[in-house]
Image: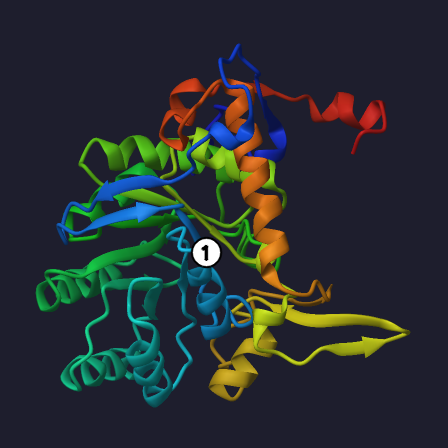
C-alpha cells in the first residue's frame, strides 16, 4: 500500500484566471478545431464536443439535431441499437456526425463485423468500457485496429498517463479519460476507485501529446465553465452526458408528475440500464450507476447555444481567439473549499 500526497483537483476546485485580451466580442472567437488523427490518418474539423453514448443522450435524434448546424458536433451512439436500425441510420444520415459504439462483449463485435460485411463502414469507432486497465482491453483494441486500419478509434476509460500511452501505442487515436465523475455514475462509491477529473485530464493530456495522440474528457462537466476548464487543462474533445439529458432528442417518453414534466436519465451500469438491455444485474456484479429524473428541457438547440456561448465567453476572458489557444492561455487558481463553506458559497 502507498499514499500519493500530491494534490489532485476536480473542476470545482479551480477557477480560470482572467487575462488581458484584444477581443471585442465573443462572436470573434473560433471554437472549432482541426485534427489529423495519428492512426487513421483522417482529419476532423468542427467543434470538438461529443454527446455521450448513453440512453437518452447518444441517440439518432440527438445526432440529427447536432448535424443540423453543420458545426462538426458529433454523437457517440449508444451500443444497444439493433443492426437494422444502425444500417438505416447510416444509409440516410451518413457516418460523419456519429461514433459507432461497442463494448468488448461478443454480441457487439459480431454486430460490428456484420455491419461492415453488409457494406457499411464506421468512420469513427468508440470502444467503451468502464475499466480500461485490463490487458484484455488492450488486446481487444489492437485487434480492432488491425481489422480497421483507416477508422478513427476512441477508447477508454482510463485516468493515468501510463495507460494513455499504452492505448495510443496499441492503436487508439483518442483516449477517453474519466472514471467515476459522471452525474449518474456511482463507481467511486461502490468501488472506492477514481481520480479527480481535472488532474486526470492534465496528466493524461501530457502523456497523449508526447505520442501524437489526443484525449477526450469524459464526465464531470455540470456547467459550461467546466468545459472551458477541460479544454484549458489540455483535452482536445469533451464528452457530455448529464448536460444533454432531458431533451426532446432523448428518444424517451415524457413523465408528468405534479404538473411538471420530467425525463428519466440513468447510468449505463445502473440497475435500470442492465434490466433494460441485459435482463437484469448479473449475480457476479453490482450496479455502478443511478437513475434520476431530470426536468424536461425541450429541444437541445437552446442548451447547446448556452454551452457554446459560455465557452466562447471563457475564451474572451483569457484572450484566446481560437479554442486551440485556450490551454496555452489558461492559469488555474485553486479555490479553498473551506472558505467557500465558511462564506456560504457552496
x, y percent for residue 44: 26, 49
Whether residue 146 sits left or right of residue 253 in the image: it is left
x, y percent for residue 12: 63, 34
Q: Residue at x 40, y 63 (%)?
A: 76
Judge whether 290 appears above or below 17 on screen: below
Q: To which residue does mark 1 refer?
A: 69
Give the quarter of the image for residue 325: top left
Secondary structure of the residue carrying tag 1 is: loop
Give the quarter of the image for residue 236: top left
Judge whether 15 appears above or below 52 on screen: above
Q: Residue at x 56, y 25 (%)?
A: 25
Q: Residues within 10 Å of mark 1 (few under 14, many from 20)?
A: few
Number of numbered labels in the structure image: 1
Q: Residue at x 56, y 66 (%)?
A: 267
Judge whether 327 appears above or below 184 on screen: above
x, y percent for residue 13: 61, 29
**Quarter of the figure that contains the C terminus:** top right
Is residue 94 visible from the viewing direction of this image? yes
Q: Residue at x 34, y 73 (%)?
A: 93
x, y percent for residue 268: 51, 69
Is residue 185 visible from the viewing direction of this image? no
* Residue 316 or residue 193, whichever sits in front: 316
Amino acid at each position: 500500500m502507498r499514499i500519493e500526497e500530491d494534490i489532485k483537483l476536480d473542476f470545482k476546485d479551480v477557477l480560470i484566471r482572467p487575462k488581458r485580451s484584444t477581443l471585442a466580442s465573443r462572436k470573434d472567437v473560433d471554437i472549432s478545431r482541426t485534427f489529423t488523427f495519428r492512426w487513421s490518418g483522417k482529419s476532423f474539423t468542427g467543434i470538438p464536443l461529443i454527446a455521450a453514448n448513453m440512453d437518452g443522450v447518444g441517440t439518432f435524434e440527438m445526432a440529427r439535431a447536432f448535424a443540423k448546424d453543420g458545426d462538426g458536433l458529433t454523437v457517440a451512439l449508444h451500443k444497444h441499437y439493433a443492426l437494422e436500425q444502425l444500417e438505416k441510420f447510416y444509409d440516410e444520415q451518413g457516418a460523419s456526425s456519429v461514433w459507432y459504439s461497442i463494448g468488448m462483449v461478443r454480441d457487439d463485435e459480431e454486430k460490428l463485423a456484420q455491419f461492415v460485411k453488409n457494406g457499411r463502414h464506421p468512420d469513427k469507432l468508440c470502444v467503451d468500457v468502464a475499466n480500461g486497465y485490463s490487458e484484455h482491453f488492450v488486446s481487444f483494441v489492437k485487434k480492432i485496429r488491425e481489422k480497421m486500419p483507416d477508422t478513427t478509434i476512441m477508447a477508454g476509460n482510463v485516468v493515468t498517463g501510463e495507460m494513455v500511452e499504452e492505448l495510443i501505442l496499441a492503436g487508439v487515436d483518442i483516449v477517453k479519460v474519466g472514471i467515476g465523475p459522471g452525474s449518474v455514475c456511482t463507481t467511486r462509491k461502490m468501488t472506492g476507485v477514481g481520480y479527480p477529473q481535472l488532474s486526470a485530464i492534465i496528466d493524461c493530456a501530457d502523456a497523449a501529446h508526447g505520442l501524437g495522440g489526443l484525449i477526450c474528457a469524459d464526465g464531470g462537466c455540470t456547467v459550461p465553465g467546466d468545459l472551458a476548464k477541460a479544454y484549458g487543462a489540455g483535452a482536445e474533445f469533451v464528452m457530455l452526458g448529464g448536460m444533454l439529458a432531458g431533451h426532446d432528442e432523448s428518444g424517451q417518453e415524457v413523465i408528468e408528475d405534479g404538473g411538471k414534466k420530467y425525463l428519466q436519465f440513468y447510468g449505463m451500469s445502473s440497475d435500470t440500464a442492465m434490466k433494460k438491455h441485459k435482463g437484469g444485474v448479473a449475480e457476479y456484479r453490482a450496479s455502478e450507476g443511478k437513475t434520476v429524473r431530470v426536468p424536461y428541457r425541450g429541444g437541445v438547440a437552446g442548451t447547446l447555444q448556452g454551452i457554446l456561448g459560455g465557452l466562447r465567453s471563457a475564451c474572451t476572458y483569457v484572450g484566446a481567439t481560437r479554442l486551440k489557444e485556450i490551454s496555452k492561455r489558461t492559469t488555474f487558481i485553486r479555490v479553498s473549499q473551506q472558505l467557500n463553506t465558511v462564506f456560504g458559497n457552496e
